[in-house]
Amino acid sequence: MEPQPWPEPAPEVARAVRAKNYGRNVPLPVAVRDRLGELFPDTEFADAFGLTGPAGWSPGRLALITVFQMAENLTDRQAAEAVRDRLSWMYALGLGLEDTGFDFTVLSQFRTRVAEHQLEEKVLDLLLARLTEQGLLAAGGKQRTDSTHVISAVRDLNRLELAGESVRAAVEALTVAAPDWVAAVLDVPGWSRRYDTRIDTWRMPSSKTKRDQLALTYGRDGFALLSAVFDPRSPHWLRELPAVQTLRVVLLQNYTRTVDARGRETAKRRERAEEGGDGLPPGHLRIASPYDTDTRWSAKGDMFWNGFKLHVTETCTTAPEDERTGPNLITDVATTASTVPDIKALEPIHQRQHRRGLLPGEHYLDSGYASADAIVTARTRGVALITPVLLDQSRQAREKAGFDAANFTIDWKYQQASCPTGQTSSSWSPCLQRGRPVTVVKFTRSTCGPCPARERCTTGKAGYRQLTLHPKAMTDALRTARADQAGRDWQADYALRSGAEGTIRQAVAVTGSRRARYRGLSKTRLEHVYSAVALNLIRLHAWWHGRPLDRTRTSHLARLELTLAA
C-alpha cells in the first residue's frame, strides 16, 4: 500500500449528483464527503499492509465502503456493485465514471487484515476525533450504556452433534492438507459413510440408547484420529492444523478415557457432576462449534442463545437535538463472549473513553453493571454511575421489621460498630472472602443475649449479631446509592437510560447487529464497530438536514388523538 490522499470527486460525477438531487437533501454518502472530507486516511491503516507487492485498493476508502455497507445492510457483492453503479458512492470515494471498482472478495480480505492487526476500532476513533474537533462531542456530560445478545454465524449444535461435527471437520481439514496420509491411515470408505455430510443435516436416533452408542462412536473415532495424527511417524505439522487442535479440546471437554481390566482404553462420555458424572467444563470455556471457537452458549432470564454480547454506549441529553447540542452519538461499542457479565465490560469501556477523551460526567446503566467496587473505581475517573444497586438481601431488610446493616453506625477510625440500641461491637476482623477484602464485625453473646431488641436484630443460633463490611469507600458508596435510588427525583433522572434500548433497536433494525455476519469474536467486534460508525453517520445526516429520527411508528388513530388534543 502506498498511502495517498483521496482524490476530489470527479466533476462529471459531482454535476450528476447535484442535478439528480436538485431541491432535495443529498444522499448520506454525498453529505459525509461534503461535511467530513477524507474521513479515514490510508496512513491510519498502514500497519496492516505491506510496503511491497501488488498494489491494492485504498484501505481508507475500503473502510468507508464497509461503513456504507453496514448502513444499508448489504452483502459484500452488493457493496462492490454499489461502488460501480451508484453516483453517490462514487462521489464519496472520489471515483470517476470509468472506474471499474474491485472484486467483492477484496472486502473480506480487508476485514481479515484489519482484524489480524487489531485495528477494528480505528474507524470509530477517527470519526469521534473528527466530531470532537467540530464541537459535537466532548468529555463530561451524560452517556448511557445497554447490552444485547448476538447470535453467532454458525449453526447451533447439541453435544452429540458437536462431537460428530468436530471429528468430521478434522477429517476434512486433514484430507485437504494431506490426502495421501489420510488414505494410508484411515478406512476411507468406512469413515466416508459416517462423515461425508454435515452431522446436523440428518435426523438423530430417537432412542436414547442409540444416541449414547453414536456418541461413543464419535468419541472412539476422534481419539483414533488424534492417535494417528500424533503418531511419531506422522508429519508433525498435521498437529498444528486448527481443526485438529479444536478436536482435541472438544474431546477433552466431552469425553474421558479409562483403562479396563484387560488394559484396553475405552471412551466414556462426560456427564454433569450433579448427575453423578465426571463433570463438564464451565460455560465460558466450553466450545460450542468447531467452526467458531469463540462462540459460547449463554442464558439470561428465559433467553438461551449461542453467540456473543454487544454493549453500546451513547451520549444522551434531555434537550432537543438543535444546533447547540447535536444528535446523540455512539461513543463506544464492546463485543464480548456471551458468558461475560455486564459488570466486567464497564471498566474496559471507561478505559477506551478515557483514551478518546470522551469520559462522561454521568454514566447511566442498568443494574447488571452495578457494584460498589465499580462505583468507587468510576469515581476516581470523575465519572458518576447512575445505576440501581442491589438492595440489602438480609432478612431484616427484606421484611422491613428489624435492624438491617444500614441501621448500624460504623466508626472506621476506631474500628467499631454501634447498634441502634447503643451497644458497641467486640471484634473487628479484616479478612478475605472470595478473594475480596472485607471486615467481619461481631457483637458478644453477653451483649446481644439480654437485649430487648434481640429478636428484631438477629435470630441466629450463635446468639449474637455479626456484620460483614466492604472497605469504607465501597460501604459508603453503597449506602449512598441505596438511599438515593429510593427518591422520586433519582427515579425521574434515571428514566434517561431507557433511551439506550431505542439505540439497540435501531442497530438491530438497520444493521442487523443481533445476528453476526462473520465467524469469530474479532470479526464480530469489527462488524459492530463499523455498524456503530454507520449509525452515527445516519444520525448526523438526519441532524444536518433538520430531520429528527423517528424511532417509533405512530398509528393514524394516535395522530388523530394528538390533533384533537391540540
Image (cartoon, rainbow, N blue to C red):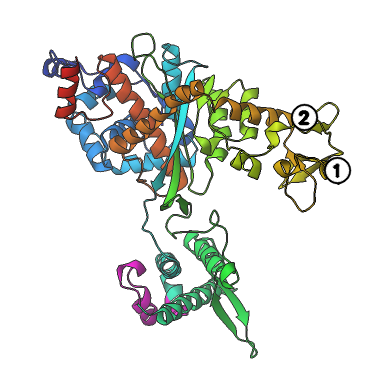
Q: State which quarter of the image contains the C terminus.
A: top left
- Report the magenta residues as a range: 183-205
Magenta region, mostly helix, strand or loop? Answer: helix
Q: Which mark is residue 141?
A: none
Q: Label 2 amino acid?
A: Ile
- For mark 2, what is the residue? 410
Asked where in the image residue 321 lies, by quadrant, the reply is top left
Is residue 44 at least partly visible in the picture? no
Is residue 565 at least partly visible in the picture? yes
Between residues 48 and 257, which one lies in front from this camera angle? 257
Q: State which quarter of the image contains the N terminus.
A: top left
- For mark 1, what is the residue? 444
Q: Label 1 amino acid?
A: Thr
Residue at point 60%, 71% (across, down):
278
Q: Residues within 10 Å of mark 1 (few under 14, many from 20)?
A: some
Between residues 530 and 326, which one lies in front from this camera angle? 326
Report the side of 491 relative to 17 (left or right). Answer: right
- The relative height of residue 195 versus residue 564 in the rendered view (above or below) is below
Q: Position of residue 421 (x, y in %)?
A: 78, 32
Residue at point 52%, 59% (across, down):
286
Report the side of 10 relative to 410 (left or right). Answer: left
Q: Position of residue 506 (x, y in %)?
A: 32, 33
Element under disc 1: loop
Asked where in the image residue 470 lies, by quadrant, the reply is top right
Residue at point 83%, 26% (across, down):
413
